[in-house]
Amino acid sequence: MSGPFRTAVGGDRIDRTRSIIVTFDGTDYPAHPGDTLASALLAHGVRTVGRGPYTGRPRGVYSAGFEEPNAFVQVESGPGEPMVNAARLEAYDGLRASSLTHGKGRLVDRPDTSRYDKVHAHCDVLVVGAGETGRAAARSAAEAGERVILADSWPVPLDTDPFPELTVLSELLVLPRTTVTGYYDHGYLIAVERRTDHLGDAAPAHMARRRLWHIRVGRVLLATGSLERPILFPGNDLPGIMLAGAAAAYVSRYGVLPGRKAVVFGAHDGAFLAASELWDAGVEIVHVADAREGHAVADTEADEHGVLRAAYVTAPGGGPPERVECDLLAVSGGWSPDLNLYAQAGGRTLWSDEHSAFVPGGGPRGDVQYVGTLPEGRPGPVTEPDGDAGRVFVDLQRDATLADLRRAQGAGLSSGEHVKRYTTIGTAADQGRTSATITARILRQSTATTQRPPIEPVPFALPAGRERGDLLAPVRRTPMHAWHEAHGAVFEDVGEWKRPWYYPRDGEPMEDAVLRECRAARERAAVLDASTLGKIDVRGPDAAAFLDRMYTGTMSTLAAGRCRYGVMCGADGMIFDDGVAARLGPDHFHLTTTTGNAGRVLDRLEEWLQTEWPDLRVRCTSVTDQWAVAALVGPRSRDVLAALDLSLGRGDGGFPFMAFRRARVAGLDARIFRISYSGELAYEINVPAWHGLRLWEALITAGEPYGITPYGTETMHVLRAEKGYIVVGQDTDGTVTPYDAGLGWAVARHGDWIGRRSLRRPDTTRSDRRQLVGLRPLDQTIVVAEGAQLVATAEPGVATGPVPMLGHVTSSYRGTTGSFALALVTGGLERQGQTLYAVDGGRSVPVEVTHPVHYDREGSRRDGDDQRDRPTTA
């Protein structure tokens, strides 16, 4: 037993086998892991934990959770923290706290060496509240295949798993000790996870003390429960007066008796259920007063320490009140749904006579749903007390009384928002959780006052927390990510995406793994996860005309079911991005962009559409996350698809290069594009993202007889660079025109596309511009460094004057054709056959300037060995 008020019953949140020591106002108190500071103090009969900020009157623990208005303390241990709710402060060995002076915390005067960090998360469904209703909602969503986050502010009970039926669901993330504290626009919510507060000095040094979650959601299910309401009467602020549900909670959760002799005063059946629990735990119930039958508490009496020792109870029909000795007065005026997040989301709250509370009244966005159960049973009416209004406390944390409310009414104030500012009721750290409904009833308001984030105070250190490594930005993973991990992929960061870099076997070095993957793509079959490719859906009667203006080529002449490579330029005529546009229908296009440029391209489309051509009837939508893509390449790729019962048909023209088809692959509806970024026969297979892993595994299985090999981004770059295909941002640098990159064939002679006039300027047409060329090191054992400067002098380090820089290496690899590179070189087209020198780190490597295409310059490989799919004009 850790305290004279600790009982043998209840206590499902504490570990009775271990003891810890907490210190409050200089006195040590034994406690158990799982206790809160409030329960630990109650276990030792500590009734006074603070004082009213303006009256100086003693105050005690009033609740067992969020709604606590009295028991705020200053944490002295660890980094320290002011104004902490003792009913929510988990006890740990060495916890030191003190009561507040005048109800105010003080800033800590020493450096906080704790770690704070941030993390970004995305989910389809966020469930707030892990009670029975919340768990059921989370299970249902996860079983339906949705990505679910279940957040609850309470810790996981010790030595138990409260969600055994949920944690087996792979698409469910359970976040205990996490308070969703703010709901903002566009499905954006903020949550605060308390990670090591309960561990004190035992917390791992590498772990953040608290974590700020930035969560983007598809929809939100609110199972936030209900808050118990007090009842007003003179002297209702004494230590020993507590919400009835909280009194029962201290028994069931912590095995603590909040008193020995109790008066229960309620207007709701819940009060008397609490009385039954207290009685079973050994509390003597000396009086029960039911407000529905006309009973009331007329006043209270304090002992010499200001702590409750008696209540004055009146009976129906009048008469003098009866003095009843007690050390606990448990009160309950009913329960109100916790609608804070609901209101933040734009939901309207309406008064319900049935519940004597504000309830959801509709109005939030369609992505928000309140799924919490409303309190059962109708509470009885509670009238304003007739006693001394100056001793009837409406807001305990603000020391605001019924007299203050009446004074505001006397000044002509009737609006709840005005009265809130006049009296300060509802503006303290507890956000008016025990006072808002009562105030609205006194004012006869049918709507609640505005709810604003944060729900709980947020330390300033948290928004300033670390953003580095995995915490720097949102981490995006493709639907096939788990497969890549399980098969040993090494990942690289591409924008926000985690992409497989290469797949080493038995510890083979990167270069060997990449060459093995390259040979598979050139000789057999290989598959790349291309889901990160930027994808934009463009629709509308003017879609074709709009794209004619955005690309250097003409898209309006593209036939439905065909694809065309396109280049986008800035107004200066420099390459901005490139990709493939596919015409899915007369007014419907599917655009692809580079992975890192997807957002910028969409912004560019919207900028011109909204500011320059608002008359065009076009809608652009990012669908990058909606489609998973597997790029199947290699001379045996057609055989792999045939093994999956591909229903493409073999009519006239078959399935030519740069064509698009809708088909069934492995039982899935798919969009297939005959596009090749490797130079080999290739198919980019798009399926809805949820089916991406199924598609990938089907391709791997079907391709086993053909030696199919997964390959990563490094191999992708080797293959594309051998074909002279550029990567915007790597082989271009904002000063490269389509002509410089050898893409003049993609530039339309007519039209008024962005950048056209700039490409006619003398500066962009001169012959000595830096142009894309290939390089071959004369010593094929050397792979020149990317970024190496190119000069014409063999030994620039011994030159007597400045050495002109002719360009730089943009891409450099060892591939199936040997060591090679791409480079931007001044007048490069005229230098083919010349020898230049790549200088990097003091080394000068002789290289021959070549054509940028190092592999299959004729393009014979892109259609495989089957002549039925020979290309037609695109």
Image (tube, rainbow, N blue to C red):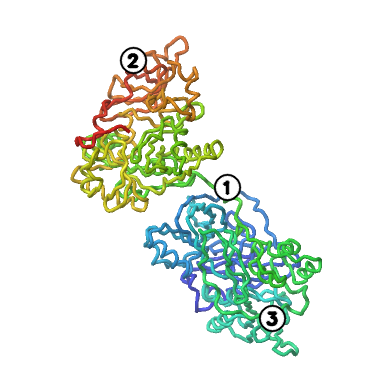
Kindly indicate the quadrant of the structure image that contains residue 275: bottom right
- Tag in front: 3 or 2: 2
Kindly indicate the quadrant of the structure image that contains residue 60: bottom right
> In the image, what residue type sits under mark 2?
Thr
> In the image, what residue type sits under mark 3?
Arg
In the image, residue 822 lies at what x, y percent? 36, 25
Bin the neighbour count of mark 1 within 10 Å (Cα to Cα): few under 14, some 14-19, many 20 and up: few
Q: Residue at x 55, y 48 (%)?
A: 465
> In the image, what residue type sits under mark 1?
Ala
Whether residue 503 is visible, yes or no, is no
- Tag in front: 1 or 2: 2
Q: Residue 579 versus residue 343: which sits nearer the camera?
A: 579
Alpha carbon of mark 1 to alpha carbon of mark 3: how far? Answer: 47 Å
Q: Residue 657 versus residue 775: which sits nearer the camera?
A: 657
Alpha carbon of mark 3 to alpha carbon of mark 2: how far? Answer: 100 Å
User: Residue 674's mark?
Assistant: none
Residue labelled with disc 1: 464
Residue labelled with disc 3: 309
Q: Residue 747 versus residue 12: which sits nearer the camera?
A: 747
Bin the neighbour count of mark 2 within 10 Å (Cα to Cα): few under 14, some 14-19, many 20 and up: many
Figure disc tally: 3
| Helix, strand or loop for disc 3 | strand
Residue labelled with disc 2: 835
Q: Is residue 393 above or below residue 117?
A: below
Q: Is residue 527 above or below residue 551?
A: below
